[in-house]
Amino acid sequence: MPTAIATEAAPAPRAKDYKSGIKPVWCPGCGHFGALSAVTKALAYLQLRREEVAMISGIGCSSRLPAYIDSYGFHGVHGRALAVASGLKAARPDLTVLVAGGDGDGFSIGGNHFLHACRRNMDMTYIVMDNEVYGMTKGQASPTTAPEWDRSKLTPYGTGVPSFRPTEIALAAGASFIARGFSGDPSGLTKLLVEAIEHRGFSFVHVLSPCPTFRPEQKEWKQKVHPCRMDTTSNAAEAARLIQGDDGRATGLLYVEDLPVWQPRNEGQADMAKIEAEFRV
Amino acid sequence: MDTTLTDNMSPARAIAITGSGGSGAVTAGQIMLSAVAKAGFYGLMTRSAGPQIRGGESAAMLRYGAQPVACMGDVFDILVGLDWKNIDRFIDEIPLDANSLILTDPETGPAPESLQPSGAKILEIPFKEYAGPVEGGRINMAAIGAAGAIAGLPLDALEAAVDDVLGDKGEPVVSSSRACIRAAWADTRAMTTMTLPAPAARDRWNISGNEASGLGAMRGGVRLVAAYPITPASEMLEWLAPRLKQAGGALLQAEDELASVNMIIGASFGGVPSLTATSGPGLSLMAEGLGLAVASETPVVVANVMRGGPSTGIPTKSEQSDLNLALYGFHGDAPHLVLAALDIRDCAFTTQWAVRLAEHLQTVAIVLTDQSLGQSRAVVDPPASFDGDYARITTGTPGDAYQRYAITADGVSPMAIPGTPDGMYTGDGLEHTPAGIPSSLNRDHAQQSEKRLRKLQDFDYGEHWAVQRGHGPACLLTWGSASGAVFEAAERLTAAGRPTRVVALRLLAPLRVDALREALAGAESVLVVEQNQSGQCFHYLRSHDVLPPHARFFGHAGPLALRPGEIIAELDEVN
């Protein structure tokens, strides 16, 4: 990765300068540490001013991320991070808006917002740290959990429900940038995040991020992840074939296309007197 | 005691126009309202409709006079039946008596028997004969001409009103409508019996409650609105969408109410005053997000236009039954503001005040209006504007030790707006330290809870917490849209030698307990009047121990509006 060029007299911020210094609540070995590291490296690479970045999240282990980044942040309620971020971006198009969350937050309770955020294609980056489990509530099945996983007391016979396929859904719903990264490969993930932030539109970065506490078997992901076997496409039909045939462990930029971005454009500053005149009898 | 004013003394006239789908009753009502405005009167037009998406029966109810009109009266002077197909659906909403006139075209058949017990006089007017010869002529226009003539309204006001209401439909529609009105007016003029002396024309506005709420929001500085469509709030959003854009803002149509409330939280976090509009079921869906706004101290405003509930209830008709939800619907201890607009004109002031309060106090404000305000139009004096300087308190350039949730003397902590160097913080729904770091410590929860309560409790809200009128041993205490009927009842009672005072609450939470006690001092009777089944405000006031023991609740659920006569009758029964 090339070294960022400083544009000011002050020393260029480095990755550590984007860390808030608050100690994460995560368990030792949690995949989210790798994701956090990749986010700070991407911000440093892009030399974004900390006060011009806003990191929005919902609820869950991964949603704790904003507190660990020294930017503006908002840690809202479960499932609504994309709604908060969409309102913020509509009001403040000048900000770089990042959204962080997990598989339960984004695909279950927040599923409707995920669909419509993809469709709206506002210029923001959505980083989902997927560990196929609800960690914060102590290990229940999430939408991406395999149907036969029976280690939760809540679903002792497995969920019996096919798992949610985030990248396919994102493509069908209209996201204009779809990538998958692995938190065990922070530098590969950093590169994807840089591209995602630079992309104009809704960038969805699906991050495989193992949970050592409730899904210890995910330590095998290190062996299972592999680079995507096809080149990045901007053709949605090709992307659909690629993603549908995918084992869910292929990393890289899967789809990118320049699609219309929704952003309100104001028409100026009409004063109230002009608006009020319509009511006069 | 007779507190019903006779016809000769009556300061107001009431005209109802009903018809089945496509008959144009509501359009006729809008033209009549515009006409009375042009003739110099104040007026109010409410409407009632069946549940059909398009068409279906509807009724327009107009009341006008030389003084501002804030409610429908006890009786209608004129009922115009464009046809009688569904009149029974409105019969409860259009009370008539022996002095009333029913205008009917003999060709549409006789007026139904259900109207006969009122003793109203039937006047046969051949609407079709007037409209028939005019190309594109419509009987609703002929009915305007006839009713206008009987009420003594000048022809030029009626014709000018057509230009106003139908102008965008093109010249042929305007000229044929005017022709129908002229023909009916000329032929009915000899029957004029209900002329009201017109006051001097002044600067007046013709505005709906939903438009006034939208205007108040924009006057308050709102530039970002996110909302999901819902009856009867959608017209506020439709009014706002293009005007926000003109004023440098935006409206987002959200995917649901969970999104709307969180979108405005995001926008407000970004420094832009933000609002959403909804009705009961939508407010229920927003409750979790509103708790987040309270905890993260992010200012937001919810304009809740109430309708019949619970559940889908009666979406097209009015009720004041979301007060409990607005007051108590939050989880946790969540101090916030609840306000209610007292009439259509006041929707502008109360919403503007709510925006400024929410911004200044960094909290949630819920503004309660209802269908009877939102979807009704009125001719009013230009709405008052709130002129206080309640700015959002932001940081300048914070030093290294910036604390977003610092404990301050007034409980309001300066807010850093994204983009401010060195102000970086994470807004949080988790309980937090003054610096905004998540904390489950007793000390932090106690400190932060105390400051969130104190900043609202200790604030000086000034005189706007209520509108008080009159003096006397009898006191009518009310809130929101019920105020119109209550003020009129008190005026009649006072005029009849029974001095009656009114306290109409605009700020419901936090309740101004001391000011209210003072307002009630010396009252020998207190009647709490509101349009819901259970006396929601009455019980709320009881819980604050602010009512004297003899205070009672009077009201009923919607959709029938509260009328001055029934309030007076209730007092008569007690005394």
Image (spheres, grey):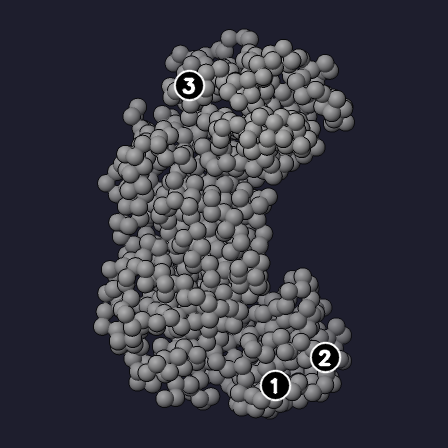
Task: Say which residue appears at 64% left-offset and 14% top-offset.
Answer: A225
Task: Say which residue appears at 50% left-offset and 20% top-offset.
Answer: A213
Left or right of residue A165: residue B239? left
Question: Is there CB contact under 8 Å for labels 2 and 1?
Answer: no
Asked if badge 2 and badge 1 are on a common chain, one would say yes
Task: Tell me: residue B279, above or below residue A120.
Answer: below
Residue B85 showing in the rendered view: yes
Question: Is there CB contact under 8 Å for labels 3 and 1?
Answer: no
Q: Judge depth for marks 2 and 3 and give the one in front.
A: 3
Which residue is the site of mark 1? Answer: B115
Residue B505 location, x and y as percent?
35, 63
Task: Tell me: residue B293, above or below residue B547.
Answer: above
- Which chain is indicated by disc 3? A
Residue B63 location, x and y as percent?
50, 76
Left or right of residue B410: residue B175? right
Which residue is the site of mark 3? Answer: A19
Which residue is the site of mark 2? Answer: B131
Residue type at tag 1 = Leu
Mark 3 neighbour density, 10 Å: few (under 14) some (14–19) many (20 or more): some
Residue in the foreground of this view, choosing between A42 and B128: A42
Q: Secondary structure at mark 3?
A: loop
Mark-to-mark CA distance, 3 and 1: 77 Å
